[in-house]
Amino acid sequence: MDDYNKIIESLSVRFIKSRNLKVLNPFYVENFYDVENVVALVHKGEIYFGDEREKVSETEILFIPAGKNVNLNYGPKNNNKISNEEYLSNREKYVGLNSNPERVGMDENSFTAISFDAKVFDSVNFFTSLDLPPFVIKGNDKLRTLILQTIREDLNHKIGTERLIKNYTEQIVIEVIRHIIEHRLFVEQLATNGAYFKDPRLIDIFMYIKDNIAGDLSNQVLAKVASVSEDYVGQYFKMLTGINPQDYIEYQRMEAAVNLLRTSKDSIRDIGAQVGYKDTAYFCRRFKMMFGIPAGKMRRRESLINI
């Protein structure tokens, strides 16, 4: 328990956005992917997810860890299969936005979605690092209340809204962690992938990558940071995290690129350079391979839950 408390104390939590949405036409999106964690509370109707299309019923919550690909079916099961790109081009056809705080949860086929970051030592996506799959949270009234408080506060825009939303988002993260632990979910993943937060050399590597995302992040450099041999650093990193360091670095660079695309007006060429890609064409190829859409469309997209 003390280990989890230490991890929670090290977490930096950031609210990204909330949306109260109504499904206008049921649709099935293949391979949804986002760099942020998402909790989606179903008010009326249903959501299905995964290859087996597991159902998320009314009052239940779907949690999607950052960086996880998942198939999502909004509304009754159907064969109206679309790509992320198709959704982005015609999203007003599929989803309507409700900005009235008094009508949260009132519409048929409606849900509230909140996205957020949760990073250990402000560098590692906590839920992503545990390699957790998307899953349903049932019977958690406290988490449901926190989601409703967040969306209503976000829609009301009163004095102190930002401070309250920050507080609610931190409570959402803690409640998700508590739910996982108390229901003994993903015990093997927690035991295997949670251990590396105790290794100070690995934390040094994480922090160095974060602070030097555009620089030289070769295994030779990382070996010096961790004070291990160049031949061993890749094995050491993968042994503790389950992935090799260069794959982790690419994910971090792409995550930084998404943030810049959403928050800056810099050119795609400049953004690629800012996250460590000197070759713009290569950056664009890798970006589309990872997210399924071109970088230019990501700029116009805040996330699947936006309209």
Image: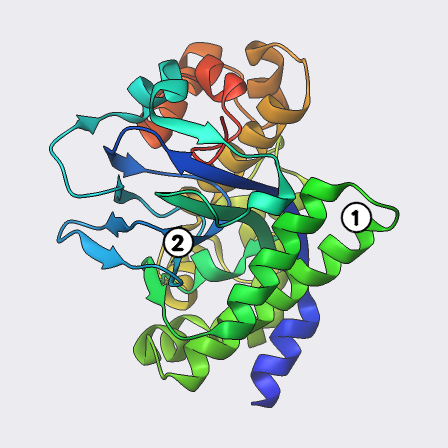
Residue 222 percent across, percent down from the top left: 56, 50
Q: In this orientation, which residue lies closer to the viewer: 291 or 16?
A: 16
Q: In this orientation, which residue lies closer to the viewer: 96 or 85?
A: 96
Vertical placement of 175 versus 104: above or below? below
Q: Which residue is mark 1?
A: 162
Horizontal relation, residue 130 to residue 78: left or right: right
Vertical placement of 214 versus 264: above or below? below
Residue 33 percent across, percent down from the top left: 37, 38
Q: In this orientation, which residue lies closer to the viewer: 252 or 57?
A: 57
Could you tell me which residue is drawn at 53 percent across and 19 percent down?
Answer: 299
- Is residue 121 at all visible to an observer of this figure? no
Q: Which residue is mark 2?
A: 42
- Residue 11 quadrant: bottom right
Horizontal relation, residue 140 to residue 293: left or right: right
- Residue 174 quadrant: bottom right
Horizontal relation, residue 29 to residue 94: left or right: left
Could you tell me which residue is drawn at 77 percent across and 57 percent down?
Answer: 164
Callout 2, which amino acid? Val
Residue 274 percent across, percent down from the top left: 63, 23
Q: Nearer the viewer, mark 2 or mark 1?
A: 2
Looking at marks 2 and 1 on the same chain, the residue that comes earlier in the sequence is marked by 2
